[in-house]
Amino acid sequence: MSFSDTVRQSYQTDIEGIRTAGLFKEERYIHSPQSSGIEVEFPVGSPPRKCINICANNYLGLSSHPEVIAAAHAGLDSRGYGMSSVRFICGTQDIHRELENRLTQFLGTEDTLLFPSCMDANAGFFEACLNEKDVMIADRLVHASIVDGMRLCKAMQDTFKHSDMGHLEEKLQEHQDKRFRMVITDGVFSMDGDTAKLDAIVALAEKYNAMVFVDDSHATGFIGKTGRGTHEHCGVFGKVDVITTTLGKALGGASGGCVSGRRELVEMCRQRARPYLFSNAVAPVIVAGALKVLDLISTTTERRDKLEWNAKYWRGLLQEAGFDLKEGDTPIVPVMLYDAKLAQEFARDLFEEGVYAVGFFFPVVPKGQARIRTQLSAAHEQHHLDTAIEAFKKAGKKHGILGLGRKELMARCVA
Amino acid sequence: MDEISKVVRDYIIREYVPEGDDREITETTPLISSGLVDSFSMVSLLRFLEKKYSIHIPDADATPEAFDTVERIVALVRRFHKTEVGSV
């Protein structure tokens, strides 16, 4: 079929439908490195404006750290620009192996395998390790990449109510006839910012003979006393069978991800995971940068401590101002607005006040659950947050939402 | 409410309504379009119906629209139950 006028018109109608529903997403062009302060061109063609960035996954403030940049430069000079190969052909350098070993040590596992992204790690893992005799039992709010990965696998799929350990136990009891059971969860849930009850999950998994899989992308580097992740935070370090995580958030923010866990599961990925077998190796420059990040965070907890303080402080400011927040204690602090159009208007109002945050709405979050997802960074200083809250309060007053609870806000919901 | 509707409704409450949530589920309460059930979690409902009523619902018929209310789910069950058992 060629891309005829009829085909084009059909897609244009779909795109217009997205716009009409108030669900159209627009990119904004950033003219500076990623940091607590950035320069943003919006709308297109306007002069870039300086903003406080409060929506990046730059949790430890290392995305533009001079030592990380210097290490990346050194990696370019010593190991080149790209591998032009998948890993198993001629795409594995000594520094890939070094990074995998360092991640193994950092996460407290038996082995680690790099992937082009955590999205790829999640896409490839289940199909490589489970079959039609097995069952995957996932928390209903797991990341979209896990849902996609599960759909590629022939194992039975089941889900449990979000963080409901009673419901998980029922599912584990129901599936005792399967060969293997795997409980699947995020460590920190990306949209709501709450933490999995990983201690309870591990206990249930031990009781009912199941493996545990955790995507810790929003936790690695800063959750837990030394930033190892949700397993450290919940006192189950060494007891999680598989951890997937990303180098694209706290660990430098470039790209790359990994599967880390039981030696045999990692080896199955090395032998069978399609994104590993068929996608280019992580570029040497990124590996070199990630190694430096691990150096920086392995010797001191200064950055994750500062992030923890920032998160507590920011949450307090928002609560005092009268915003409706999801409960939690992580650096992800969603400001609930429920209505998609309101979320977009609110984000535009914040931008006018020099604060950069983006409205989240369907399909990124369920319909009627739109929000501004704020995320703290160790690069934020107190004055950034004091300035940002004034912008939030001004926008909140403009839209008449301060002091309103969930039911009242939802009652005003149009989209 | 007939027996099948009651069984389906009770399952949906047990399987999908969060602890402490006191919302009412009637025969016409939107399930998928309200976000209570999504395509990811719908699979356990489908499996329950197939096992409980010894039927097979083809993928083409197991759509979000067909599963959006208790009423529609019961209609689907009756349709495939009748077809497979051969009785009215």
Image (cartoon, rainbow, N blue to C red):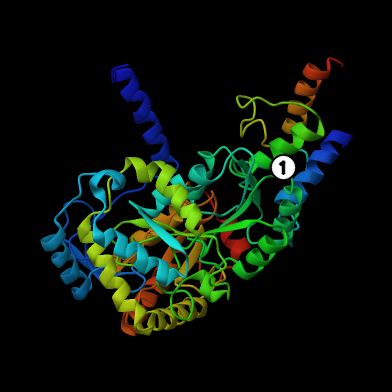
Residue at image point 58% right, 72% down? A236
Q: Nearer the viewer, residue B23 or A265?
A: A265
Where the N terminus of chain B falls, by quadrant? top right
Q: Amino acid at mark 1?
A: Thr
Classify residue A118 by image quadrant: bottom left
Which x, y percent locates residue A29? 22, 55
Q: Nearer the viewer, residue A123 or A40?
A: A123
Which x, y percent locates residue A262? 51, 59
Classify residue A105 by image quadrant: bottom left
The residue pinned by badge 1 equals B29
Outermost residue, left side: A77
Does the rendering let one see residue A116?
yes
Which x, y percent locates residue B25? 76, 46
Q: Nearer the viewer, residue A113 or A68?
A: A113
**Whether residue A283 is situated above or below residue B33 in the rendered picture:** below
Classify residue A244 by image quadrant: bottom left
Which subunit holds the residue at mark 1? B
Q: Determine crowd level at label 1: few under 14, some 14-19, many 20+ residues with C-alpha closer than 10 A.
A: some
Where the C terminus of chain B falls, by quadrant? top right
Q: Secondary structure at mark 1?
A: loop
Which x, y percent locates residue A9? 33, 24
**Whether residue A179 is situated above or below residue A65 in the rendered picture:** above
Residue at image point 52% right, 64% down? A187
Does the rendering let one see residue B69?
no
Tag count: 1
Query: In the displayed structure, does residue A76 sit left or right of residue B61?
Result: left
